[in-house]
Amino acid sequence: MSEVDLTTLSLAELERVASERLPPMAWDYYASGADDERTLADNVRAWRERALHYRVLVDVATRDLSTTILGAPVAMPIAVAPTAFHRLAHPDGERATVAAAGDHGALFILSSLSNTPIEDVVAAARGPVWFQLYVYRDRAATEALVRRVEAAGATALVLTVDAPQLGRRERDVRNRFALPADLGVANLAGTGFAVTPGAIAESGLAAYFASLIDPSLSWRDLAWLRGITRLPVIVKGVIRADDARRAIDHGAAGIVVSNHGGRQLDTSPATATVLPAITAAVAGQLEVLVDGGIRRGTDVIKALALGARAVLVGRPVLWGLAAAGRAGAAAALAILRRELDLAMALCGAPSIAAIDRGLLEP
């Protein structure tokens, strides 16, 4: 496989390569959803079911895919979503994925549950890095981590709000998911919740998560978080228009329309189905990002046409990482960029600004 040009593949083909290379426990950890995995499948299906009503006789000789996210210039409206434990896929882990994002001028969001310290990730970056945050039971520990993230050079916090407890992922339960003996959770050192290498074992992830995360988290805690940081706070895990409005009222800089990749509450709605109501409700008062099931460049166009500023992709980047490290992760982003560029040409949209609701509802 190393002699094949990975960028010539589709993401589905890249997924097959990753499934062959990853150990079954690691593959199931990345690939699985909660319970019957209905939401996992619905996320992909919902984008496919929308049709694109393309325009003709538009000059698309050149296309401009660049945009901004929270004012930061990026080369395309495709960012890397926060996903845990990249060193399960490749020894270079998050260093490789952030470098791949930099290869394409893309935003990278680092998971709290990364195997690589935030300082090392930012040092390897050539573009903006955000940090995904859970609020811990110990607020002093949370604040200490926020200070560390600020000092490292991350430019925003992404507060995950859809995980008061960990969803039941039956594949992980059956496999007795465990981190390899040489891997830990690097960003929690000094918080009181540090995980030393080999500590998460025998299906211990759910129990560890329950000990870590504060299930009493509420909207008042968003105000608390904003009060202890100079960084903008993005709320991740919104699927309701009224919650999007509450995010505005509580000072969020943006939201991510997300159901955690189908890994939390099974039978929650696909993100493509709730995005229109949410973007209508916020009416441009904050930036809206979306994740969940983005597998084609046409999916990106549909998300932007529904009012999203950009999309986040998680599993496809991990597939690339498993296939060929940094080059594979970069290939995943290159595939989506190539497909987006072609879809823009075929839709009669020479720029990101030209992608509007009319492409879905003429």
Image (cartoon, rainbow, N blue to C red):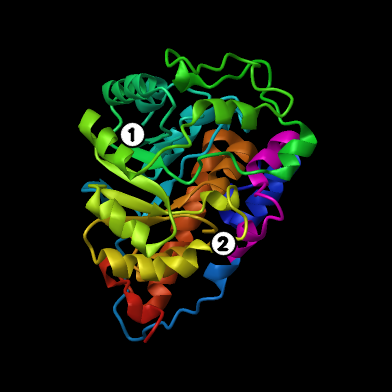
Quadrant location of the N terminus in the rendered image: top right
Magenta residues, as a range? 21-44
* Label 1: element kind: loop
Find out whether residue 338 is within the magenta segment.
no
Tell me what residue is drawn at x 59 percent, y 55 percent.
11
Which residue position holds label 2?
Answer: 43
The image quarter containing residue 21 is top right
Where residue 252 sits: x, y (%)?
26, 47
Residue 309 appears in the picture as rendered: no
User: Residue 58 is drawn in which quadrant?
Assistant: bottom left
Residue 336: x and y in percent read 48, 56
- Can residue 280 be seen in the rendering of this structure? yes
Q: Which numbered disc flags the more N-terminal residue, 1 or 2?
A: 2
Is 8 rendered above or below residue 331? below
- The residue nearer to you, when weighing 300 against 339, is 300
Q: Residue at x 28, y 72 (%)?
A: 354
Numbered mark located on residue 126 in the image = 1
Q: Is residue 332 above or below residue 121?
A: below
Q: Position of residue 190 (x, y in %)?
A: 42, 12
- Which residue is depicted at the point 37% across and 70% down? 277
Q: Amino acid at mark 2?
A: Asn
Q: Is residue 191 left or right of residue 173?
A: left
Does the magenta segment cover residue 33?
yes
The spot of residue 127 in percent (x, y) is 32, 37
Gap between marks 1 and 2 measured at Cα: 30 Å
Viewer-proximal residue among 54 and 243: 243
Label disc, if present, on residue 199 of the rendered structure = none
> In terms of secondary structure, where does tag 2 sit?
helix
Magenta-colored segment: predominant secondary structure: helix
Outermost residue, right side: 174
Q: Amino acid at mark 1?
A: Arg
